[in-house]
Amino acid sequence: MLQLVADGLVVGSVIALGAVGLTLTYSILRFANFGQGEFMTWGAYFAVSTLAFVLAVTGGGVMEPLGPFSFGWQLIVAMLLAAALTAILALVVDWLLFRRLRRGNAITLVIASFGAALALRNLVQFLYGTLPEYYSREIQIAIRLVPRDVMGGLRVTPDQMLVIGLTLVLMLALQWLLTRTTLGRAMRATAMNPALARVAGVDVEGVIRATWVIGAALAAIAGVFVGITLQIRPMLGFDLLLPLFAAAILGGIGSVRGAVVGGYIVGLAESLSVPLVGAEYRAATAFAVLIGILLLRPNGLFGARA
Amino acid sequence: MEILPVLNYLAFFMVFAGIFAVMALGLNLQWGFTGLFNVGVAGFVAVGAYASAILTGPPEPERFGGFGLPILVGWLGAMLLSGVAAFVVAVAALRLREDYLAITTFGIAVVIQLVATNAQGLTGGPFGIQSIPRPFVEALGTGFVWNLAYLGLVALVLGLAWWALERLVASPWGRVLRAIREDELAAASLGKRAAAFRLQSFVIGCMLMGLAGALYAHFVGYIAPEDFLPILTFQIWAMLIVGGSGNNAGAVLGAFLVWAIWSVSGNLIREVLPAAEQARGAALQVVLIGVMIAAILVLRPRGILGERATVSRHAGKD
């Protein structure tokens, strides 16, 4: 039981990070971006390349594990580089595609994001192949936090704890950015009323760029987290897309706090449903959550009333 | 006899293109005429294919179904079951903002794929369902003549679907659909219940997709989960967007054209690339479809044919 909760929190962290980006683009650019999952995949694979680069530059080519973790400081640098590259990728896709369609129907943007996601996913497959990749081959010993006779016991690896901790730090930082800085206020104003924001002197195109950068960077970090705790595959992001949408809608579109809470709820629901429905139907749990929220409270837990 | 393999391939190609055209017609009713964004095409096709296979197939000890019913019953069952699945999705998502339907149909396709892969007792799991009966196979054998006969059957179904949709779209019912798509408030103020019309359009479109799935199953004689991956959805979307949504002729033209591009590029990859690089080549083929959707949206949003302007007979006379 405790073990399932812990696993759910790790998965939930990844879903929360991805869902925050999704909810931001959804509220500011006003369309459901089916490409959000692919930013996770690209982030994870970018980090494979940047890690190799950092290791080559610093010499040796071997990563010395950092304290109890399975990876060294090089992976942290590689992750930041990958986040920057993913942000650039998002800006390029926006410049090539979404920018040209923004005046039209919102659904046209959804279709376009669909085509873009398809192209991005298969491009990864083309460039990196389909075999799973890992950042580190170090075997990590899980730490026993709770003995086996108390609620099934609990074993967690230091990597998993780091993922949960870093996610919370990132979310607090984002909350601060959105509520305390000029950029954050501009973003929230644009989300509420783009025309009024423009009249009030907000640089809407700049806000859109900032939204892509934040959303893609968080997605890339989430992708790296998947790579640290599980493995890196071309379908990594696609398989997480349904949980991302479920989390963003559960939290209420546009609500960052909601996306985080929604991410953890979906992660926990998936994890806790495994003994009931079996691991193979895990993804169906996210769908059940989605249908449930659409039927009962379509504006989400933290959403504004329509 | 060099000509027979070519003709056989051509018949094969046309059967597939015809089946895709039926799916594209269903999607055109939903997206082209009603503005409903369905990302679960592959899921509804799969429901139809599996339903017909289970209803008509020979009994198997480890799997539910195998009722050995006539193929026509299987096809009707396929339409019915896809319609039911569409109804469930529509009830949950249609009354909400339009992109929620996209997300929900995406979800149902994922779940259908999970069921197809894992519910061994119903769908045969990853190995799928074999020995799905083929119509007239006793009389015609399995050679070129049979392919040609099946092509005739597909053409008949496609023709019927075309005729029915053209009638529907031109009818008052079709006019209301377009009115709702263009201006829901105006249509509602004339007493048209938008939700009910959308629901009908969505369910009918998905029933066509289910029928197309059954056509596919009885042609190939074997179905497995990997026949209904999201790539199928993308292909149908590419067909509709390239051909021109809102126009049934465009949907059919797009189906033949995109399927031709797909087949030619696939053959090219098989011919040109060494065996070790084929998987990567196939990935590049999908990139091509994705880029094609995006490029058409930016450069020629109407598609090749596009929607015909509908103007009232009474307008603009003087």
Image: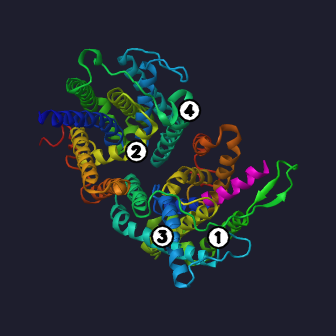
Of labels 1 and 2, the one closer to you: 1
Q: Using the rendered image, report if marks 3 and 1 lie on a common chain.
A: yes
Q: What residue would you read off at disc 3? A: A86
Find out whether the residues at labels 4 and 1 contact each other: C-beta distance under 8 Å: no
Type of amino acid under label 1 = Leu
Type of amino acid under label 4 = Ala
When the figure is inspected, residue B160 is found, relative to residue A257, above or below; the finding is: above
Classed neighbour count for the residue bearing mark 3: other residues with Cα under 10 Å, few (<14), some (14–19), many (≥20): many
Q: Is mark 2 on a helix, strand or loop?
A: loop
Classed neighbour count for the residue bearing mark 4: other residues with Cα under 10 Å, few (<14), some (14–19), many (≥20): some
For the record, the magenta segment spans: A1-15
Find out whether the residues at labels 2 and 3 contact each other: C-beta distance under 8 Å: no
Residue at point 22% right, 35% down? B14
Quarter of the figure with the C terminus of chain B: top left
Q: Distance between the residues labelled 2 and 3?
A: 28 Å
Find out whether the residues at labels 3 and 4 contact each other: C-beta distance under 8 Å: no
Task: Pick whichever, B3 or B49, lies toward us.
Answer: B3
Q: What residue would you read off at disc 1? A: A170
Find out whether the residues at labels 4 and 2 contact each other: C-beta distance under 8 Å: no
Residue at point 27% right, 33% down? B169
When the figure is inspected, residue A83 is found, relative to residue A97, above or below; the finding is: below
Q: What residue would you read off at disc 4? A: B119
Q: What residue would you read off at disc 2? A: B37
Magenta span: chief secondary structure: helix
Q: Where is residue B159 in the image (x, y as percent from the top left)?
A: 22, 27
